[in-house]
Image (cartoon, coloured by chain):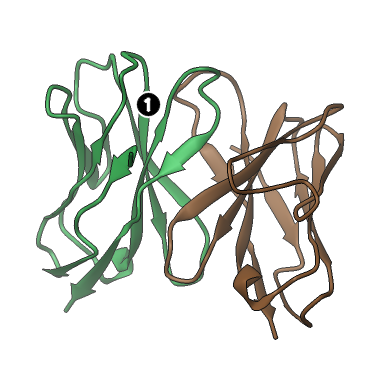
Chain colours: A green, B brown
């Protein structure tokens, strides 16, 4: 079964608008961590934001925030005030016990920001 | 954070040959991870490399095809053996610096491999 599901293969947004990228996950463990990464066309993987399963508040990092709904097992990334440089692939990933080391990635969402 | 250097950054290889990818980290790390990203796909973990022990391979990946070395806490190599066009991918090295479930994985810039 898929551990991480990203149902939006592609998303379009206009500059300065907000956009939400969806991510649902599947785990039976109460302790886990969720990550979002950005991969521009140049290929590097850039860490954006983290949400722990026990965190009481939604994570925020600058223009990035996480809409974490634990009961629904969703961790959607919200990008506010989109910029042209936000055009990239976005991957949701999860880390579980034991060890909390390896990451399992979703299939990704390609975001295109238009002027 | 960590600075991860991968070499080569890209290569074009002939079918049946092997290529070794190097990964150097600027700090000591316990585990190093090797991922494969096939064209238009997500990242798939190949193996986890611990210093001083055999690498742990994920389902679908075998040591004969992807031998890994981990001679010390800052360096690892991944060899892609007997290459075929299906091995054309980006190969990424990754590490976690520090402990705790909230520590992100940091990635090298990847090796873009094309097999003719």
Position of residue A13 relative to residue A73, above or below, is: below
The residue located at (16%, 79%) in the rendering is A115
Q: Nearer the viewer, residue B86 or B10?
A: B86
Give the residue at mark 1. Answer: A33
Classify the position of the C terminus of chain B by image quarter.
bottom right
Label 1 SS = strand
Q: Percent x, y for residue B100?
A: 51, 18
The residue located at (52%, 50%) in the rendering is B44
Position of residue B10 relative to residue A62, above or below, is: below
Q: Nearer the viewer, residue B105 or B88?
A: B88
Q: Percent x, y for residue B92?
A: 62, 55
Q: Percent x, y for residue B8?
A: 76, 67
Give the side of residue A66 with respect to residue A106, left or right. Answer: left
* Quarter assignment of residue A92: top left
Outermost residue, bottom side: B116
Give the side of residue A93 with respect to residue B32, left or right. Answer: left
Disc 1 chain ID: A
How busy is the neighbourhood of tag 1: few (under 14 within 10 Å), some, or many (20 plus)? many
Give the side of residue B110 with respect to residue A89, left or right. Answer: right
Is residue B109 something one can see in this rendering? no
Q: Nearer the viewer, residue A33 or A55?
A: A33
Give the side of residue A57 with respect to residue A32, left or right. Answer: left
């Amino acid at each position: 079964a898929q551990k991480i599901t990203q149902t939006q293969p592609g998303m379009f947004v206009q500059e300065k608008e907000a956009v939400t990228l969806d991510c649902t996950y599947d785990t039976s463990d109460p302790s886990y961590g969720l990550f979002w990464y950005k991969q521009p066309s140049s290929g590097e993987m850039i860490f954006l934001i983290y949400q722990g399963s026990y965190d009481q508040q939604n994570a925020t990092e600058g223009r990035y925030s996480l809409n974490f709904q634990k009961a629904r097992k969703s961790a959607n990334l919200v990008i506010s005030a989109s910029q042209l440089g936000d055009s990239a692939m976005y991957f949701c990933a999860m880390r579980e016990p034991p060890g909390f080391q390896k990451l399992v990635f979703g299939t990704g969402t390609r975001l295109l920001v238009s002027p | 954070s960590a600075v991860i250097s991968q070499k080569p950054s890209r290569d074009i290889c002939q079918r049946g040959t092997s290529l070794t990818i190097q990964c150097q980290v600027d700090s000591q790390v316990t585990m190093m991870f090797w991922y494969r990203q096939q064209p238009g796909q997500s990242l798939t973990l190949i193996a986890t490399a611990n210093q001083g022990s055999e690498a742990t391979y994920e389902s679908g990946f075998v040591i004969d095809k992807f031998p890994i070395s981990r001679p010390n806490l800052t360096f690892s190599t991944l060899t892609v053996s007997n290459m075929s066009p299906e091995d054309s991918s980006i190969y990424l090295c990754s590490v976690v610096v520090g402990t705790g479930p909230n520590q992100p994985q940091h990635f090298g810039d990847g090796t873009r491999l094309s097999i003719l």
